[in-house]
Image (cartoon, rainbow, N blue to C red):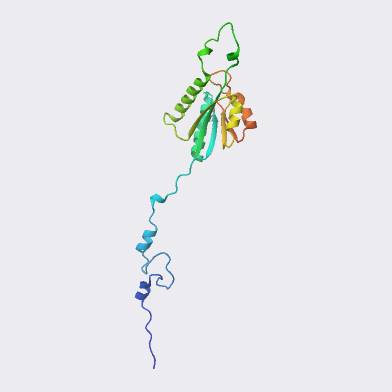
Amino acid sequence: MTTSQTPPSSQGTAERGDQDVDGRASRFGVDGTGVATDDYNRSIEFDAGSRPPVHPRTTRIVVGLDGSAASLGALSRAVKIATAMNATVQGVIAWSLPSEWSLPSIYGNYGLANWSPESDSQQMMAAAVSTTFEGNTPTWFIPTIRQGNPAEILIDESRGAEMLIVGCRGHGGFAGLLLGSVSMACAAHAHCPVLIMHDDDDR
């Protein structure tokens, strides 16, 4: 006697949930109709709170400042590069006492006794920051004012930096600081690549 066998129903296949209508394992939660199931929809919901944090600014760009147009151009360029690289910008001003400061004179000090190059440097830094950031200084800008030879200080600050940017032919607001006179020294001895900006460079 011939016994007929009933083929498995499509309903039974759908109830298993782990296979599609072709008998293949359903990996994406799609039912027999090709419609995504609720489990699949829930699995692709984007959790805004799970976004990775923004990487901290670990890269540093050093820029020499002396109040000249070239140094302001250097700072502006440093900000553009830092924005693209997610880096910090360290603005460095080096100041030193003029040679006349230590020399006695029967003619007096011509007002030098009441003049502070460090105070001038602070005002210079404030002016550069105000011009560049228009009163909205970012937290990733690092102002640095040090006493000493500009070339030596900039070369020292270039350690571990991604780039050093200096102006060429610039002159500061007090004697002894000619940033242009140290640009070649920085190019030759800095511990990182050096970008030299000129007065007429486009910011």
- Is residue 126 visible to the viewer in this orientation of the structure? yes
Give the residue drawn at x 53%, y 19%: 117
State left or right for residue 193 relative to residue 115: right
Q: Count of labels shown?
A: 0
Where in the figure is residue 97, as x and y percent of width and height? Answer: 57, 18
Where in the figure is residue 60, as x and y percent of width and height? Answer: 53, 37
- Is residue 202 visible to the viewer in this orientation of the structure? no
Give the residue drawn at x 39%, y 50%: 49
Give the residue drawn at x 62%, y 30%: 186
Residue 106 vertical position relative to residue 192 in the rendered view, above or below: above
Q: Residue furthest bottom?
A: 1
State left or right for residue 89 relative to residue 47: right
User: Which sits in the foreground, 103 or 138?
Assistant: 103
Where in the figure is residue 31, as x and y percent of width and height? Answer: 37, 68
Give the quadrant of residue 198. top right
Image quadrant occupied by the N terminus: bottom left
Where in the figure is residue 79, as x and y percent of width and height? Answer: 49, 34
State left or right for residue 162 relative to residue 53: right
Q: Residue furthest top?
A: 106
